[in-house]
Amino acid sequence: MIADSVLRVRDLSVEIALPSGTLHAVSNVDLEAMRGETLAIVGESGCGKTMTALAAMRLLPRRARLAAREISLSGTDLRALSDKAFSAIRGNRMSMIFQDPMTSLNPVYPIGDQLEEIHMRHRRAGRRRARERAEYLLDRVGIVNPRARLGQFPHQLSGGLRQRVMIAMALMCDPALIVADEPTTALDVTVQAQVLRLLKDLQAEFNMALILISHDLGVVARIADRIAVMYAGRVVETGSSGQIFGAPTHPYTRGLIDCIPYPGKTARRTRLGSIPGIVPSMIGDSRGCMFRNRCGWAEDRCRTDGNAERRIEEGHSYRCIHPVGHLQGAAS
Amino acid sequence: MSAPVLECDRVTRLFRVKRGLFETPATLRAVDDVSFSVQEGEVLAIVGESGCGKTTLARMLLGLLPPSGGSIRFAGRPMRQVGRSEIAARVQPVFQDPYSSLNPRKTLGQIVGLPLAVHRIGGEPERRSRVAEILELVGLPAHLVHAYPNQLSGGQRQRVAIARALAIQPRIVVFDEPTSALDVSVQAQILNLLLELRQSLNLTYVFISHDLAVVEHIADRVAVMYLGRLVELGGTAAIFDSPRHPYTETLLRSILTPDPSLGLPPGPFGGDFPDPLDPPPGCRFHPRCPSAMEACRAVPPAAVTDTAGRVECHLYNGESHGR
């Protein structure tokens, strides 16, 4: 096998019917996560990054409607599976880490029970084997004295430790894919660096695909191999980490990068770049480029024509008729 | 040299914390023996991780919480003598969460006008024109004066919170994580606004944040707190270009600039934050410190003040402990 594709999503759309109209939460998203690779989905709140992940994990809210040409995990078509068959895969071959470990751990059970349950359920293994696995993984995620920790409850652990427990939990069945949704947003900066390093090391060691969802460009730049930038439900640009930060091409990607203060680069106490206006409503008509009302290059054609995918080079593509950066002026 | 508008002299704040139903309450030293001053017109940032005491310090600077020990002086006068209403007229807060800090049942006009009414500034028509003026100043369209907070985005709400703080023309604004709840594109808009307002209104800012990239961008001086102690204080350039306290170094190392060629920063980050109710003896940072020495485990370091600023670490305590 040359390219070992783990998760492949093609033409995914998620719509939610609301009293005021149809909310286009995700529109025509293509993604591919490869074994041993970190794919970051980056964007601001409401851009559809979490919805995309939840759709792949079949965890969407009940009233959401999903359409896709393909959602497959290591060649298995996930769309065809019954809910029961899917739940045998979730937590087993693909697992998810959420932002807030306090609300995703059950407060009334010791963490050991919660870790073991996953293994016993998916592997039909006995409690002793499950306990050994839990202890091994707690040690692997850097928790000192794992045996004693197994008997503790979530409230007895710090935020950083709880997130380590969540990572251990995601690894219990040796998954091919981990989806981490803002895994370090609730953590302090020094703890964030440790948890990210841990995720990256474990990914290499277990040779998994990692999808990291984040709003933080710094996190994304340091950990991702490939990046998908989402805006208002669409992937507006996708490329390698070097391509996205070295040659951002969609005006939104460029604007986002210019917005963040960069110690050592942006001059202190000067104006930061900013994107004027606010994210448009995603209810109702979703034709054309959704970024057009905040974009300095927008013109009439953007209302209808802005969504075709254009390719710059292998692996780097964008959806815009007015690319910025080195392609500026070169577009037709 | 401008005069200090706020001075903290050995300020300490203790809390009694109940851990369990039958246990004796423990004492939390949320802010411990902290001294610094805020100069007229500067932006002083206070940085540190959760539980370091930065928000408690902010509440004391706002006069919302009396210190347990030490004193705070406002424009040369002890805060205790200044009185609640006058402090409020001079020092105004902007909080982190623009969703919970605005009354959902009041219109923007009422929210921004409330401080004027409380301080009995002007009559009804004057207040109305002042509110319109302030809304324009923070970049909100005039028609929003009749809108309710739930009709606004997060960035617009934070602009309302800033407008309310500025309504009575304070000298000092204390910002507690003003952009952490906002998206990055909106954060940039708000930071630009804060820099403009400071220039045009000659304001003094106390800016509390855990985001060092933001602090580097906006602050003139930076105070670094760890477990209630002020461990380092200095000019922004000095702190970011040549940090002295090992904790400041650790913090700086954990900033993730968006440079894909760098990868994740090398450790160690020295493990987890200790229990604030049971802080380590000696220097509070020693269990996480890569350069900890014998003295650090037993003796709390004294503060060293020089031209570059102030640092509380045995590495800089002169000949007695080496280096």
Image (cartoon, rainbow, N blue to C red):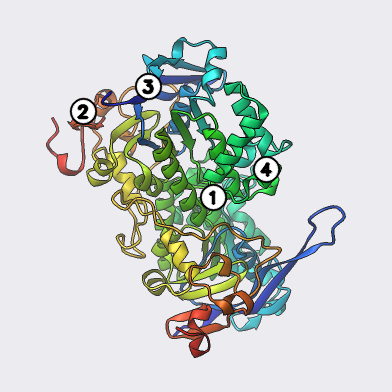
Say above or below: A312 vs B237. above
Pinpoint the chain carrying mark 3: A
In the image, are marks 3 and 2 on the same chain?
yes
Residue position marked by numbered label 4 in the rendering: A154
Say above or below: B216 vs A331. below
The answer to the question of whether label 3 and label 4 lie on touching residues, with beta carbons closer than 8 A, is no
The mark found on residue A187 in the picture is 1
Identify the secondary structure beneath mark 4.
Answer: helix
State the image coordinates of residue B253 (x, y, percent, origin top left): 41, 61
Q: Amino acid at mark 2?
A: Arg
Distance (Cα) linking label 3 and label 1: 30 Å
Residue pictured at 45% horizontal, 45% vertical: B183
Pinpoint the chain carrying mark 1: A
Residue position marked by numbered label 3 in the rendering: A9
Q: Earlier in the sequence, mark 2 or mark 4?
A: 4
The answer to the question of whether label 3 and label 2 lie on touching residues, with beta carbons closer than 8 A, is no
Say above or below: B19 vs A155. below
**Alpha-carbon neighbours of circle 2 within 10 Å: few (<14), some, or many (≥20)?**
some
The mark found on residue A310 in the picture is 2
Distance (Cα) linking label 1 and label 2: 38 Å
**Alpha-carbon neighbours of circle 3 within 10 Å: few (<14), some, or many (≥20)?**
many
- Image depth: mark 1 or mark 2 in front: 1
Q: Nearer the viewer, residue B108 or A244?
A: A244
Residue pictured at 54% horizontal, 64% vertical: B288
